[in-house]
Amino acid sequence: MDFQVDGEQVHAATGSRPLERAEPAIILIHGAGMDRTVWQLQTRNIAYQGRQVYAVDLPGHGRSAGAALTSIEAMADWLDRFMAAAGLKTATVIGHSMGALVAIAFAARYPARMDNLCLMGIAETMPVHPDLLSAAKNNEALAADLIVFWGVGEKAQTGGHPHPGLWVQGASRTLLGLSRSDVLYVDLVACNAYAGVLAAAQKVQCPTRFILGRDDKMTPAARARSLGAAIGQSETTVIDSCGHMMMLECPNQVHAALVGIV
């Protein structure tokens, strides 16, 4: 489904189901260099539980036009304008990795917009390795290789998946290869620069769910503890034998962890 935000076309997947405006709204926000399709195993599931679902392509990603936004704060402010364009007063916002930074910044800046918050693959700080930044800046294949190596858990690296035919490593590499040459670098710089995670957590007023991977090398689960402590109404689910790409690696466990928030 397409919307107009800031004069540019924005695309969001709605789970192949007509929107019912009386239903609660769920917004899914992807990570760096990715797009709405990273949520392909969640979007339809959520939509058919009686929810309006919007898996958005951030500007410059997927089928959304415009340039990639250069800061987490700018993405959070853009999300407010997206909700206005979609006619949404409030929503449950679910973010993964960079999308989780956007989600927590949005919750801190626009508390009246929030029903619930769900943060996946997040840590108090999310610095980006210099080798990854350099490879992304130079549009080298090494960037995708590093993300897949660090981002996919050991179990998924060895193959096998509950959904036949899904190869997590290959799917992740292909998705990263679909983005424009500059997008991954812009996103990673924004993640590297954002130092406001804990301060944002202290301002969150809505019920919050953390979903973390026990084998996550990019955002280790232990580094999210301070965020949970800073949010008054928070719960944490840690998925065993799961890395950073939990939506693809362990979709059934993610579905179970989302019960009660979607």
Image (cartoon, helix red, strand yellow):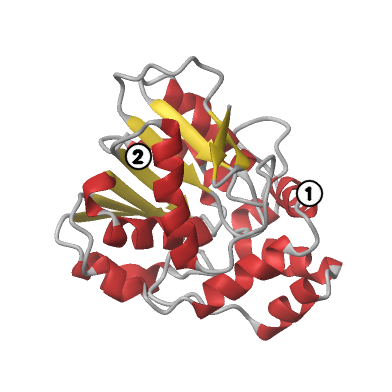
Residue that sits furthest to the front in the current view: 7
Report the side of 218 relative to 118 (left or right): right
Q: Residue at x 42, y 79 (%)?
A: 195
Residue 92 percent across, percent down from the top left: 32, 41
Image height check: is 259 above or below 181?
above
Amino acid residing under circle 2: Leu
Q: Which of the 4 image quarters holds residue 8?
A: top right
Residue wearing tag 2: 258
Q: Residue at x 49, y 56 (%)?
A: 99
Q: Which of the 4 image quarters holds residue 91?
A: top left
Residue 5 visible in image: yes
Image height check: is 126 above or below 248?
below
Task: State yes or no: discs 1 and 2 in contact (Cβ < 8 Å).
Answer: no
- The answer for how far apart the CA atoms under marks 1 and 2 are is 28 Å
**Disc assigned to residue 178:** 1
Report the side of 238 relative to 218 (left or right): left
Image height check: is 210 above or below 15?
below
Residue 190 percent across, percent down from the top left: 56, 71
Residue 97 visible in image: no
Amino acid residing under circle 1: Leu
Image height check: is 109 above or below 71?
above
Q: Residue at x 35, y 31 (%)?
A: 25
Report the side of 56 relative to 123 (left or right): right
- Residue in the foreground of this view, choosing between 67 and 51: 67
> Which of disc 2 and disc 1 is earlier in sequence?
1
Quadrant containing the C terminus is top left
Report the side of 91 relative to 206 (left or right): right
Label 1: state its secondary structure: loop
Residue 61 percent across, percent down from the top left: 67, 49
